[in-house]
């Protein structure tokens, strides 16, 4: 028993404390580097889907909603369909928005989500973001 206590007393104790000295940038603003994603040791480069035409955007959104696993009555799904008519609730809308974010490479704000309750609303939102990207050479902030 005493031997066991001695072993516990001999273990080093690691203490990690934040460095008290602030980092200096020498008058220059540091730029954030792009995030690199690795999977199994390999760098993943994401090629985002680029939608330029209205037909492409409509087809993308319709395909996305039809292929979503909780969508019911898929054959009756149109651009003017409400998501609730096809068995989708607000959590499903969040999941669809996350998929759009992943595929297209931009962020849909939390304030916008309650407004996106029809397929056409998603189409119009994507169209507006793509138009903003063309005009301003960057995606809008969330």
Image (spheres, rainbow, N blue to C red):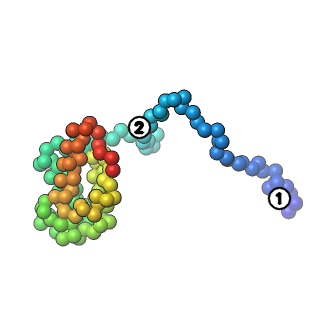
N-terminal of the two: label 1 or label 2? 1
Task: Write down the quadrant of residue 75 in the picture.
Answer: bottom left
Describe residue 108's horizontal placement relative to residue 83 as left or right. Answer: right
Query: Neighbour class for label 1 at 10 Å: few (<14), some, many (≥20)?
Result: few
Q: Measured from the top left, where is residue 123 in percent x and y? A: 18, 54
Q: Residue 41: tell me if it is visible.
A: yes
Instruction: In the rendered view, tell whether residue 1 sits above or below residue 45.
Output: below
Q: Measured from the top left, where is residue 33 in percent x and y? A: 44, 36
Describe residue 61's horizontal placement relative to residue 23 as left or right. Answer: left
Residue 34 is tagged as 2
- Viewer-closest of 121 and 47: 121
Which residue is at the far right?
Answer: 2
Look at the image and tell me in which quarter the N terminus lies. bottom right
Residue at 25% over, 38% down: 136
* Residue at disc 2, secondary structure: loop
- Viewer-closest of 1 and 52: 52
Residue at 29% over, 39% down: 138
- Viewer-closest of 81 and 65: 81
Q: Residue 63: tell me if it is visible.
A: no
Residue identifier under label 1: 4
Task: Write down the quadrant of residue 37 in the picture.
Answer: top left
> Does the residue at mark 1 contact the one at mark 2 (Cβ under 8 Å)?
no
Mark 1 or 2: the one toward you: 2
- Quote the CA–CA distance across marks 1 and 2: 50 Å
Q: Measured from the top left, where is residue 94 in percent x and y? A: 31, 61
Residue at 30% over, 53% down: 108
Instruction: In the rendered view, tell whether residue 103 sits above or below residue 88.
Output: above
* Residue at disc 1, secondary structure: helix
Residue 111 is tagged as none
Q: Measured from the top left, where is residue 79 in percent x and y? A: 13, 59
Query: Neighbour class for label 2 at 10 Å: few (<14), some, many (≥20)?
Result: few
């Amino acid at each position: 028993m005493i031997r066991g206590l001695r072993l516990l007393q001999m273990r080093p104790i690691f203490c990690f404390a934040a460095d008290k000295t602030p980092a200096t940038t020498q008058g220059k603003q540091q730029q954030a580097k792009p995030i690199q994603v690795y999977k199994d040791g390999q760098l993943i480069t994401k090629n985002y889907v680029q939608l330029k035409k209205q037909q492409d955007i409509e087809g993308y959104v319709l395909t996305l909603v039809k292929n979503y696993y909780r969508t019911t009555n898929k054959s009756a799904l149109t651009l003017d369909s409400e998501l609730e008519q096809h068995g989708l609730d607000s959590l499903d809308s969040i999941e669809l928005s996350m998929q759009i974010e992943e595929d297209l490479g931009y962020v849909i704000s939390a304030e916008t989500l309650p407004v996106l309750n029809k397929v056409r609303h998603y189409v119009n939102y994507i169209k507006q973001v793509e138009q903003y990207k063309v005009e301003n050479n960057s995606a809008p902030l969330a």
